[in-house]
Amino acid sequence: MKVVILCGGLGTRLREETEFRPKPMVPIGGRPILWHIMQIYAHYGHKDFVLCLGYKGEIIRDYFRNFHWNTCDLTLRLDRKQEVTYHTRHEAEDWTVTLLDTGAETQTGGRLLRAIRHLERVDGADTEPFLLTYGDGLTDSDINRTIAFHREHGAIATVTAVKPKGRFGELAMDGQTITAFREKPEEEAGYISGGFFVLNRSIAKYLTGDSCVLEREPLEVLAQAGQLKAYCHAGFWQCMDTFREQEMLNRLWATGQAPWKVW
């Protein structure tokens, strides 16, 4: 199943790092957080990625173009043949990575709309699902269980709902149906969007162009229509919005206590 990852935002709340690189390239344990996210999906068998680039997207392009050069042990032959022999290999070698320039100023819904145009159809139906997430969040949620839940309920969209500590918006829910999508209400309680989505291609009908913010009108309209469902996850979830959160994730990785390392 295709995995779309939004990698184009400015990441202004992590200015210490994002002044020099896009947030998905901020390192956790010496590897970009984007690599960790892709490893989670690959663990569950989803290895066909579409990365929506924007701010400093050239850094992400360079990373994947030189992936083996920068991550493998190798031997260089410097005569006329100029051969390179790689001595180590990675699971990532069977990933397929599509890099899309979705614009520096494009909003999340606009980036997704541009990406959908590049997703090959398998069954030719608008109900054919794909996966979507942001380039700054980690979880130990079972991706395949989320997909199975999505197929069972038949709505257009599923989001993994989580219960982190404070400062985020919340989802108003009736059982497993989301009745309102409030990005940042005054008082925060209950479940929030964990940012790991399963979506049908018909989501494109709700995306109006580059200025479209996915988390506003599209998801709000779907919620009002009963077409946005919640897969509730009680385990680990953490986004990386601040330097403090980056430090915490690095500390978990360094001590061998990273819950998202399911591979």
Image: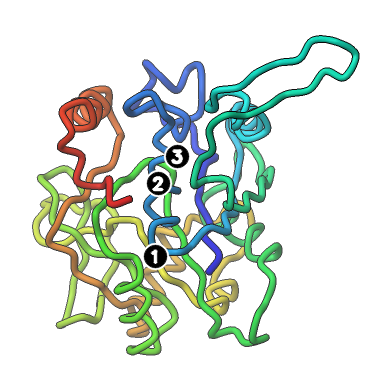
**Label 2 residue SS:** helix
The residue carrying mark 1 is 197
Badge 1 or badge 2: first in the primary sequence: 2
Q: Is residue 94 above or below residue 35?
A: below
What residue is at 28 percent from the left and 65 percent from the top?
142
- According to the picture, the residue beneath numbered tag 3 turns out to be 35
User: Hey, what amino acid is under mark 1?
Assistant: Phe
Name the residue beneath numbered marker 2: 37
* SS state under label 3: helix
Q: Quadrant of residue 35?
A: top left
Residue 3 appears at what percent x and percent y? 52, 60
What residue is drawn where x is 34% and y is 89%? 152
Q: Taking 115 as reference, is 176 left or right? A: left
Q: Earlier in the sequence, mark 3 or mark 1?
A: 3
Q: Quadrant of residue 227?
A: bottom left
Tag 3: amino acid: Trp
Task: Specify few, some or many for label 2: CA neighbours under 10 Å numbering under 14, 14-19, or 20 or more.
Answer: many
How are the colours assigned in the image?
rainbow
Asked if 84 appears above or below 7 in the picture, the reply is: above
Residue 4 - label: none
Gap between marks 2 and 3 measured at Cα: 5 Å
